[in-house]
Image: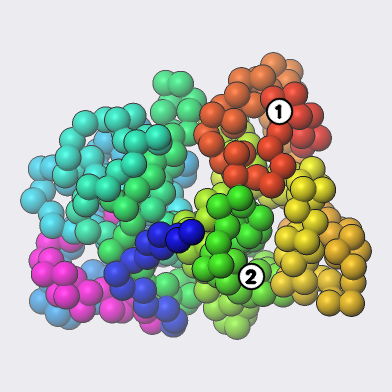
Amino acid sequence: MSSQIILPRILQVGEGASGAIPDVLESLNCQKPLIITDKMMVQLGYAEKIQQYLSAKGMSADIFDDTVPEPTVSSIQAGVDKIRNGNYDSIIALGGGSPIDSAKAIGILGKFGGQMQDYKFPRIVNESGLPIIAVPTTAGTGSEVTRFTIITNELTDEKMLCVGVGFMPVAALVDYSLTLSLPARTTADTGIDALTHAMEAYVSKKANLYSDTQALAAMRLIGPNLRTAYHDGSNKNAREAMMLGSTLAGVAFSAASVALVHGMSRPIGAAFHVPHGLSNAMLLPAVTQYSIPAAEKRYADCARAMGVATEQDSDQQANQKLLQELRAINDELQVPTLEQFGVERQKFMDLLPLMSEQALASGSPGNNPRVPSTEELIEIYQQLW
């Protein structure tokens, strides 16, 4: 059985990779890009730096900086309007997962029209929107190398998963130097998100030999470097390892899909506005403990790749060490419980049946080695309180 692997046409990795933007635009025969980003990237001067790269080659770019964390149907509409009224031929997506996800949606809607709801899974979007050059500034989402975007329908509190080649950036410029200014909290949340991507890709029922090699490589990079990057954001070696690990994890889950953690994470984010990486971190230990009985060897491989278990450890010993490590990471990186985050207990408990239905409906739990019932999902959610 074969597996279809979809990647950006251009993948440039390493310090200074973002400086290649003008050359990439020229290779795509594009003249008028729109930079889609957020206000923090403007404040940090990253958007202006890209404009300087372009100016040196006689090019220019406007900026749209009104993207928001956890993008919604309404938050991307202004970007869609700007694209449709501005005669742009390409998009430079600069930032973390939210600006890149926003750019993917804007690139499709700006070209083809309609509403985001028209493009949500199970529809597969293979139409080519405006070409996107993705420049990630966090080591976490892997969105620069995936054929997915997630946009929240704020009217229904549904996080809509949108899938297809049409959402894959044409180019990904992976420049770890852009992560050196990341605050510790963002480093933690995005780093655990990347670790979750790698682990879920490896244990997914859709895993294949290609995705396995990427996922294991990602865990070997992320496992030993996550804490260092969190405690010392200026450590270039750790930042470089985390950045490449994040990208490889994105390649892995784009080829193998995510599983139960992500299926359960989206409803938490939609209902309580918990950042995606943080809700993944909250879920990862509990979901891993639930899932290990159905994939003992696979999870043990994860523990060994992360460097917390050795080849001499039995699979059972490795998995105990894996669970200890995931809990220790959350403690050290100060991942809060839902109560500590400020979620109202009664509202959370009341929403558990709906959240469980939404999680199952997303399709991701079906990729998990152990597929839960609605009742089991509720029990796992309750552990997070």
* Residue picked out by circle 1: 373
Depth check, front residue: 187 or 264: 264
Q: Around disc 1, counting alpha carbons within 10 Å, would you say few (fewer than 14), some (14 to 19), or many (20 or more)? A: few
Depth check, front residue: 99 or 244: 244
Residue 326 point in image, percent of width and height: 78, 57
Instruction: Work out which residue is located at the far front of the displayed protein and give it.
Output: 1
Residue 145 visible, this orientation:
no
Residue drawn 33% across and 29% down?
Answer: 117
First to last magenta residue range = 16-40
Image quarter (top left, top right, bottom left or bottom right) of the C terminus: top right
Residue 116 point in image, percent of width and height: 31, 33
In the structure shown, which secondary structural element does the residue marked by tag 1 occupy? loop
Please tell me whether residue 355 is drawn above or below residue 180 in the rendered image: above
* Residue picked out by circle 2: 216
Determine whether, in the image, residue 200 is placed left or right of residue 89. Answer: right
Mark carried by residue 189: none
Residue 371 visible, this orientation:
yes
Is 197 magenta? The answer is: no
Q: In which quarter of the image is residue 352?
A: top right
Q: Do the residues labelled 2 and 1 touch (CB within 8 Å)?
A: no
In the structure shown, which secondary structural element does the residue marked by tag 2 occupy? helix
Residue drawn 84% across and 76% down?
Answer: 310
Residue 107 point in image, percent of width and height: 24, 48
Residue drawn 89% across and 60% down?
Answer: 316
Determine whether, in the image, residue 152 is placed left or right of residue 48. Answer: right
- What is the three-letter code of the residue carrying label 1? Ser
Residue 358 point in image, percent of width and height: 56, 27
Q: Around disc 2, counting alpha carbons within 10 Å, would you say few (fewer than 14), some (14 to 19), or many (20 or more)? A: many
- What is the three-letter code of the residue carrying label 2? Leu
Is 37 magenta? The answer is: yes
Q: Earlier in the sequence, mark 2 or mark 1?
A: 2
Depth check, front residue: 49 or 166: 166
